[in-house]
Image (cartoon, grey):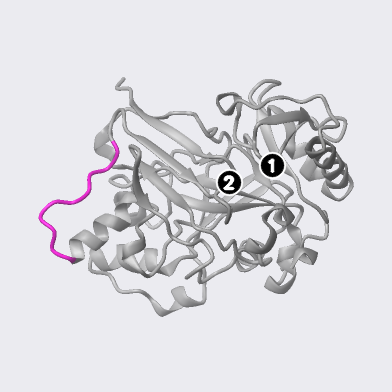
Amino acid sequence: MAGLCRFLEGAVKLATLKSGGRDGTLVVVDRDLTVAVPASPGARTLQAALDGWARIAPRLEVLYADLMQDELDAVPLKPAALAAPLPRAYQWLDGSAYLSHVERVRRARGADMPLEFLVDPLMYQGGSARFLGPRDPIRIPDPGWGLDFEAEVAVITADVPPGVTADDAGEHIALVLLVNDVSLRLLIPQELAKGFGFLHGKPGPAFSPVAVTPDELGAAWDGRRLHLPLLVHRNGEPFGRPDAGRDMQFDFPALIAHAAKTRPLPAGTVIGSGTVSNHDPEIGFCCIVERRAVETQSGAETLTPYLDHGESIRIEMPDPEGRTIFGAIEQRVEVRRS
């Protein structure tokens, strides 16, 4: 369904260097994530490219093709030098599209799954003034807040009109990338009890080194979902590998349509899938709280602890040949008490 992305009929991988100001410098990256070239004169930043996506995306496609054919003077790509592909955004909206995750977490605290959750997506608007880069540490002052990771897939949109239908919303997906939606689990309950959503419990997500156009994903992208396993490692040990295309109750066009029900979405809106989760628990998990929920239900005497100082998390998605698509989010935890 490559036709759903009307803005670009081709493949591109994009990253943003930390140098060049608050919004960084946009670069086009080769398929193996080894070298890059500046995206200018197409656009100096990713937001500038998204603002003129119909006009600029074809230029980026040409740059990518030339780069892949070794026709450009490229420089080595260093993951530590990368910001999030979109270092800050007009909107960060995170859904909860995998209901196996929702159901497990609710069941562990004795709550039922409301029937409306099957037809009406959960979604919150998080802070987007500054996103973490793929190698930025996760810094917190208190490990007692219950630090957790949430491995997700996300899309970045071009301009989306208000009231867009799910049938048409896929046309406005410009890019796809990975997310670690950092969560402070032991602060969230009292926030939700107020009935007014997240604030302190969601300190800010981190994003994969690169964002890619849907066409770069080939047959794994069906225009609505990304059908590949999402690999999560904690301290170098496998934690989960659920398939992002399986058990996704609300696909990305449905999430976009939900977000745009009463308002337009500006170019550069980032929409997350929520924690990727499959019904089969043997495949593992993309967050600690879901594993703890399963342990609680099974009567385990001890639960998997939340993250502490010095621990690491790695989130990555390989293609069917085992090559990384987006690069890896690799973060270490730093506890810095005031």
What crowding class fits label 1: few (fewer than 14 Cα within 10 Å), some (14-19), or many (20 or more)? many
Going by the image, does 187 lie left or right of 117? left
Indicate whether 33 appears above or below 238.
above
Q: Earlier in the sequence, mark 1 or mark 2?
A: 1
Depth check: 9 or 321 in front? 321
Q: Secondary structure at mark 1?
A: loop
Q: Position of residue 215 (x, y in %)?
A: 74, 56
Residue wearing tag 2:
323
Q: Position of residue 232 (x, y in %)?
A: 41, 48
Depth check: 29 or 251 in front? 29
Residue depicted at 65% across the width and 27% down the height = 77
Residue range corresponding to the magenta coloring: 298-307
Q: Residue furthest bottom?
A: 115
**Callouts 1 and 2 close, C-beta under 8 Å:** yes
Which amino acid does the dot numbered 1 rest on? Arg
Depth check: 167 or 34 in front? 34
Quarter of the image that includes the C terminus: top left
Quarter of the image that includes the N terminus: bottom right
